[in-house]
Image (cartoon, grey):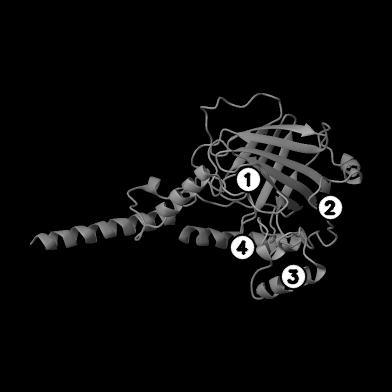
Amino acid sequence: MLGDRILASAAVPMALIVAGLLGSVPGAAQTSSTSKAPSASKAAAAKKWRTSWGDPDLQGSWLNTAVTPLERPARYQGREFMTPQERAEAEAKRAEGEKGSFYDPSYLDGRTSLIYDPPDGRIPPLTPEGQKRKTAWHESQRRDPPGPFNGPEDLNLRTRCIIRDPLPRVPANYVNGFDLVQTPGFVAITMEALHDTRLIPLDGHPHLDPSVRQWYGDPRGHWEGDTLVVETTNFNDRTRFENSTQNMQLVERWTRVADDRIDYRFTVSDPATWPKPWSASIPWNKSGPIFEYACHEDNIDLYAFLSVARFNDRKAAEAAKKGTK
């Protein structure tokens, strides 16, 4: 949308700064162990990443930018990894596409999909209920002309700057940054897109009552060794990840595996949408500082859409008036 394109221009300087600070991105030495749990040697090495109060230290600015697709393309069916030749060709094609544009710090680690479970690298087929919701949503988007836009509430959440995307966050074409801060008993994750911070308690309290629903759900975290595990429930019915319902359950895991890398994984389950849970792995790489992504509901998209809608209303009213004469 127009607003997204305008906001995207503000993100370009950040990408340039990240390019200078990030340097080379790890991934060249990845092997078939990528989608498996971190090795014992990595777990032992992680002991050095500790906060002053003794928790594993995940703090810093990170990017989850990656060009590996969420789902495995048909041409890689049955293969978790590209061949060396396929990877070289993909890197060359990407480099050619970047000519004349700003540096893209994303990388390709040779995996054919971010999804590693199920083994086919694909989102499980939708349940009949899930397919019905998906069809209804597509039908609702086929309005020509779009609208009616009688007020801000008729526009999507991204245009209104309420949230950009639901959880879990998978790599997008830009604004893939996160700032992670820890204190004893809490972890805070600020997402670059829009203005959202997730405050995650680690005190063992139960989830909120199911009647309480939130844009990013209700997170509860704990440590499993050197891994931060966060279970999130209580989503509202407006933040649908891959057509899920408000009853989706999200389990996320962050494990520090290098000075400049976090192994991030998520598992989503929602029996009303998919017959079984599915999981993906997305590397988080150290980045430069994350700058403000200024977005608020009083933005140019709202004026543009609503002004055009009112113009069309006046034209329709004039046509109707002429028709009655």
Residue matched to label 4: 12
At a point 76% along the width and 58% down the height, the residue shown is 80
Q: Report the amino acid beneath label 1.
A: Pro
Q: Are there few (<14), some (14-19), or many (20+) residues within 10 Å of tag 2? A: few
**Label 2 to label 3, Cα distance in Å?**
21 Å
Q: Where on the picture, by quarter, is residue 73?
A: bottom right
Q: Tell which of 76 and 160 is nearer to you.
A: 76
Residue matched to label 1: 168
Circle 2 sits in a helix, a strand or a loop, which is it? loop
At a point 73% along the width and 51% down the height, the residue shown is 119
Could you tell me residue 102's position as x and y percent?
A: 65, 69
Sequence-wise first label, 4 or 3: 4
The numbered disc on residue 33 is 2
Circle 3 sits in a helix, a strand or a loop, which is it? helix
Is residue 195 shown above or below 75?
above
The numbered disc on residue 245 is none
